[in-house]
Amino acid sequence: MRFTRIIALAATAVLLQVAVMPHFRLFDTLPDIALIVAVALAWAYGGETGAWFGFVTGLSYDFFVTTPFAMTALAYGVTAYFAASLFGAADRRVPALIVGFSMIAGVLSGVVFVTASILAGGGGVQRGHSLLTVVIAALYDGLLALPIFAVVQRVVGDTERARS
Amino acid sequence: MADFARGGRRRYVLLVMVLLSVTLATLNSRTGDSGPVGTAGRLAHRVVQPLSNAVSTVLSPFHDWWHGVTHRGDLVAQNRKLKQELASAQAKARDGEQARLQNIRLRALVKFPWQNDYRNVDARIARQQVANYSHAVTLNVGSERGVKPNMAVVGPLGLVGRIVSVWQGGSTVLLATDPLFGVIVRPLLSTQTAPAQHAPDGRISAKFEDDSRHSQSVVKIGPGDTLYTCGCDNSALPLGLPVGLVQQAVRASDRNNVEVVVQSYVDLASLEFVKVLLWQPGDPYPGEIKSSMTPPTTTTTLAKPAATTTTTTKKSGP
């Protein structure tokens, strides 16, 4: 049952990212909805769940962009994996931590994506411009983190109990 | 012990993800749009497109509101600029008939038949850029209207981009503002060409070869000139599409090149409707395009190297 909900959550996150968020760009930058959901899952259910969720949603997102294929998947997966290790012990009920960690996850994801894309020959990713984009996207991620975490917790259930 | 085993498994997961990404990236770069990744991508677009269209329609007022909020500074500046332009236009309009006739004469002099002479299909931008690091938009026309990869997409002012993937009911356009987008450009009445590429600052730069033996530059390009697609033999884009307006043309310090900075004609914020030109390499050019873009036949006699140049120019007929 929870698996079905996670699949529905993944589909919704990708659709939001692809169809809705382009209408709400902030300084010409988009947030990473699927990444924040992956981080929320990783924080609650552990690195593996978050990482696979991030990888699959990132891969779905990669179909809609012209950057090297599978690089978003790698960035989301790796970020969610490390998010579990870095934030796992922190108290998930503190809103400031959620916002802060989401921003850190946004920066980490952006750095992994830009580095991997450059290595994969993605000339479209420009170093100077990318740095600014990473920072703005991370801020936007932080801005949306609280409602996304709340939705994830509501959809997937009581994360504390699930973990224990 | 259990923790150790779990830690090992987690590291294994990370390794699997990295290997999967590398494999998929390699598979996609080798097979391109015709491979399994391309097929899956087209399917994903076909599934999402109707929803995306519906969302665009519903969110249109919110989009405009959000754009107004987040681009307030730009809007104020644009409003001020438009007011100045309006005042200027009103002044010009007072000249009335004379200006109109002059306009007709100028239009006859400089023909821009690039848009409608090519077979084309009208398209609407169904989805704006969906990523932070790629400059691409989705159109509402696809293979059902004869759209194919590498076809040129033009807006009211000129080249917008080229088609990179097509499916039933839609297509993706790589915008001319993407650093991956390269195009060979030339001035209107010249055969001199140069590869142009987008720079991080948002402008296009091109480097025309110049002959350092001449005291004066043989590349005749200046600010205000328009650069066009060259339609060279190996070019996927047709001849004569305006690419951008020259802002700066400077002879390089080695005197062998003229470096040109061009402002692209892509204005994504105001772009909603475009045309896909159904021209493909090997197709004949429309007569109008050919005659308006043919350079004059030029015979150059060097009387004294690096001193005097006598040039006889004869306009070649279509």
Image (cartoon, coloured by chain):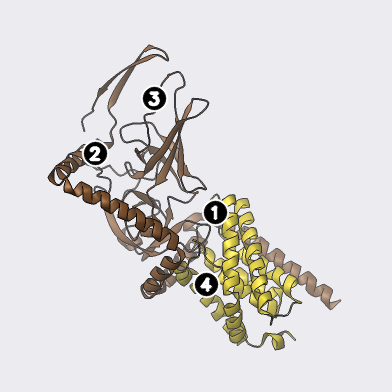
Chain colours: A yellow, B brown
> Of tags 4 and 1, which is closer to the observer?
4
Image coordinates for residue A84, horizontal then vertical, percent: 72, 73
Using the image, tell me which numbered label, if any, was put on residue B110: 2
Q: Earlier in the sequence, mark 2 or mark 1?
A: 1
Side (left or right) of A41 relative to B68? right
In whole angstroms, how far apart are the C-alphas of marks 4 and 1?
23 Å
Q: Residue at x 54, y 53 (%)?
A: B30
Q: Residues within 10 Å of mark 4 (few under 14, many from 20)?
A: many
Where is mark 3, residue-wise? B218
Q: Residue at x 55, y 49 (%)?
A: A123
* Circles 4 and 1 in contact, beta carbons < 8 Å: no
Q: Residue at x 35, y 64 (%)?
A: B140
Confirm whether circles 4 and 3 share one chain: no
**Which of the two residues, B50 or B241, is positioned nearer the viewer here?**
B241
Confirm whether circles 2 and 4 share one chain: no
Q: Amino acid at mark 3?
A: Val
Side (left or right) of B50 relative to B87? right
Using the image, tell me which numbered label, if any, was put on residue A14: 4
For the N terminus of chain A, the image quarter is bottom right
Q: Residues within 10 Å of mark 1 (few under 14, many from 20)?
A: some
Q: What is the chain identity of the residue bearing mark 3?
A: B
Q: Amino acid at mark 2?
A: Val
Image coordinates for residue B10, horizontal then vertical, percent: 74, 71
Using the image, tell me which numbered label, if any, was put on residue B29: 1
In whole angstroms, how far apart are the C-alphas of marks 3 and 1?
41 Å
For the C terminus of chain A, the image quarter is bottom right
